[in-house]
Amino acid sequence: MAKDPNAAVAVNRRARFDYEIEETFEAGLSLLGSEVKSLRNGRANIAESYVGPEGDEIYLINADIPPYSGANQFNHEPRRKRKLLLKRKEIGVLLGAVTREGRTIIPLKLYFNNRGLAKLLIGLAKGKKTIDKRETQKQRDWNRQKSRLMKNYG
C-alpha cells in the first residue's frame, strides 16, 4: 500500500493560530541525499523553525530533519540552515515585506509534490494579538459544538 504522494511530511499547526497568513508561496528546498531519505520516512519537525533572509537569499532555519540511519558517516546535521529555492521576484516580494512592513515568513507545511520533489509552503504573515487568538478559539469551539449538535439532532 503506497502512501499518498501529496501527504504532508510535517505541518506547523501553531502557525495559523499565532499568525494571520496574508499570502502563501511554494518554495523548493536545497537538501542533501540523507535529508531526502529521512523526509521520505516521514520524519521532520518544522514547529520551532522559521524563515529568515540573509543577503539576497532566504533560508529555513532550525527545522529538524533527523539523521537517516542508513547514511552512517555521510549523514547531515539535523538543524542546519537550508536554502529555499524561489524565483527572484518572489524573493523580492518577501524581502520587501519583511524589511519595510515588518511581516514574518512562516513555514506552514513540508511535503512532496506530484513529481516527488520536496516543497515547503511558506506564508507571509502578520502576528495576531491575544484578543484575536481568543476570537479564533471561540470560533473553533463553536464550530465543533455546532457539528456535534447537527450530528445528534440533524
Image (cartoon, grey):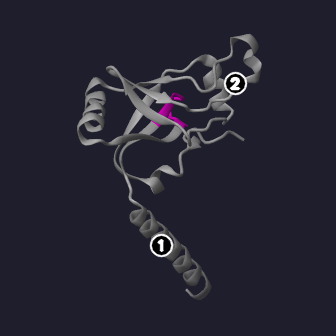
Q: Which quadrant: the C terminus?
A: bottom right
Judge by depth and name the residue closer to the eye, 46 or 128: 128
For the residue marked with disc 1, what is the amino acid? Lys
Q: Residue furthest front?
A: 130
The correct choice, above or below, for 140 with respect to 27 in the image is: below
Apparent side of residue 101 relative to residue 128 in the rendered image (left or right): left
Residue 7 visible to an observer of this rendering: no
> Mark number for residue 67?
2
Element carrying mark 1 = helix
Residue 138 visible to an observer of this rendering: yes
Write down the region rendered in magenta.
111-120
Element carrying mark 2 = loop
Apparent side of residue 62 relative to residue 1 in the rendered image (left or right): left
Q: How far apart are marks 1 and 2 (CA)?
A: 40 Å
Apparent side of residue 70 relative to residue 83 in the rendered image (left or right): right
Q: Return the disc, 1 or 2, that comes first in the chain's sequence.
A: 2
Which residue: 31% across, 25% down?
87
Q: Where is residue 151 in the image (x, y as percent from the top left)?
A: 59, 80
For the residue marked with disc 2, what is the amino acid? Pro
Which residue: 44% across, 66% down?
136
